[in-house]
Amino acid sequence: MLYRNLVSMDVEESIRANPVDGVVLLCGCDKTTPALVMGACSVDIPAIVVSGGPMLTGHYKGKEIGTSDVWRFNDAIRSGQMSEAELGEAEASMCRSRGHCAVMGTASSMACMVEALGLTLPGNAAIPAADSRRKVLAQYSGLRIVEMVKEDLTPSKVLTRAAFENAIKVNAAIGGSTNFVIHLLAIAGRIGVDLTLEDFDTYSNDIPLLANIQPSGKYFMEDLYYAGGLPAVMKELLGSLNKEAITVTGKSVEVNVGDAECYNRDIVATTANPINPVSGIIVLKGNLCESGAVVKPSAASAHLMKHSGKAVVFEDIDDYKARIDDPNLEVDESSVLVLKNVGPMGYPGMPEVGNMALPKKLLTQGVTDMVRISDGRMSGTGFGTVILHASPEAAAGGNFAVVQNGDIIELDVQNRSLQLKVSQAELDERKKTWKSKAADPGRGYVSLYVRTVEQSHLGADLDFLKGGSGSVVTRDSH
């Protein structure tokens, strides 16, 4: 996230500094897609996105594998169920072509996001990187941007409130990454659409899981493409989408996907018979996250969706690494793991460490999931009952900053609640001796980032980058 914002600045200024009438945004993995879209939105000249595409599905010992299996392999290594030699073989079998992650991780979620927003030609999201049809789509996109310039079809005309609502609903239906929340909020802030964290819960609330793709399902992005791609998913959702929203084709969403076909109902289900009736992003509120936190129920464990347990607190990532496998760590499967100071300011850039690996001694006992809470993010390839983006983050001094070992934490996903069973008077008393761990590096971009980054519930953009600069450059503006 540190460099998502920096790349967005580079994109914005590169477009402004050159005499271009339209731009093709060539995006790849997790951060480049939102970064390029954010920069282009701030300038608002005609823009079309072409994603790099997912890699081909991996194969290991007769099974299909992808990057979500990294987490399973990691646990297997730590519990002694897999050897280093086997891990090396699996690694060599996993990434067998160019492209981003083969599952519905953040990269695939971002590719689906821009297609659902209407910023790409239909079908962009799922074509494998190694498939020749990816080059064909790129060529058609190059032809289309010329026409978009003639039509003056700018991002602000495509990225309406209706487009953002569509993207939230589609993300729910595909079991998309929790990182989608932060990136879409940042894009909305650049284009001037009033989007809030609560909207992600509201607009995904009644959308079932339709795409049977890991980590929420069984299959891979390559399979999704062969089954009809994102247009097949969006056609199933048409009754819930804003069908008249205009896209970069110059046509509506309904026209774009109206003739889409599904070729495998085990991969793209119907709304009447979904993969899982539970999907989307659920926004939690409570005294442990005054401004909100998020959880992806389709990747969580049903028995932990309502849970109460004692907090096992790690003050930062180094504390976690030092103690998580300590045999003397006071923890059991009912405990709630809490990781502080990995948010936008506290660990500059808000890294993907929120899906903490479970204590080794519990893995050897057969425990496969626990409630985990942090102010950081997790990879879209990850899974488990993981509460993320707790806001305000620990470094900003909210209640999350003063959670202590042994505090009782109550999670109730159905009622959107995350509560620390400690009185406000006690929390206020703890804050009197609290000191932020957010150190200002003193110079350079990281210092600028730490001083100006917004909290995760606002999109973690730099506060002075909200809104747009436009494409006209005068002597006074430089």
Image (tube, helix red, strand yellow):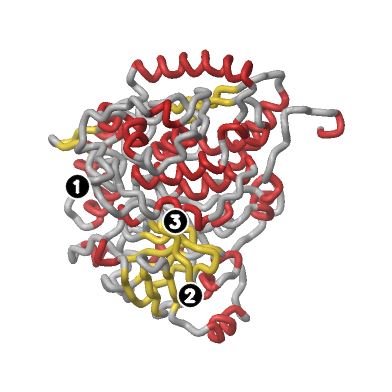
Q: Position of residue 217 (x, y in %)?
A: 25, 45
- Crowding at label 3, few (<14), some or many (≥20) Cα neighbours within 10 Å? many
Q: Is residue 3 visible?
A: no
> Where does label 3 land, which residue?
201
> Where does label 2 land, which residue?
403
Q: Nearer the viewer, mark 3 or mark 2?
A: 3
Q: Position of residue 438 (x, y in %)?
A: 61, 61
Q: Mark 1 or 3 closer to N-term?
A: 1
Q: Nearer the viewer, mark 1 or mark 2?
A: 2
Q: Is residue 461 above or below residue 14?
A: below
338 or 169: nearer the eye? 169
Q: Mark 3 or 2 closer to N-term?
A: 3
Marks counted in the figure total 3
- Tell me which amino acid carries mark 1: Ser
Q: Position of residue 415 (x, y in %)?
A: 39, 68
- Tell me which amino acid carries mark 2: Val
> How far apart are the two marked residues, 1 and 2, measured between alpha carbons?
37 Å
Q: Are marks 3 and 2 in contact (CB under 8 Å)?
A: no
> Where does label 1 land, which residue?
83
Q: Is residue 281 above or below residue 371?
A: above
Q: Is residue 131 above or below residue 186?
A: above
- Crowding at label 1, few (<14), some or many (≥20) Cα neighbours within 10 Å? few
Q: Are marks 1 and 3 in contact (CB under 8 Å)?
A: no
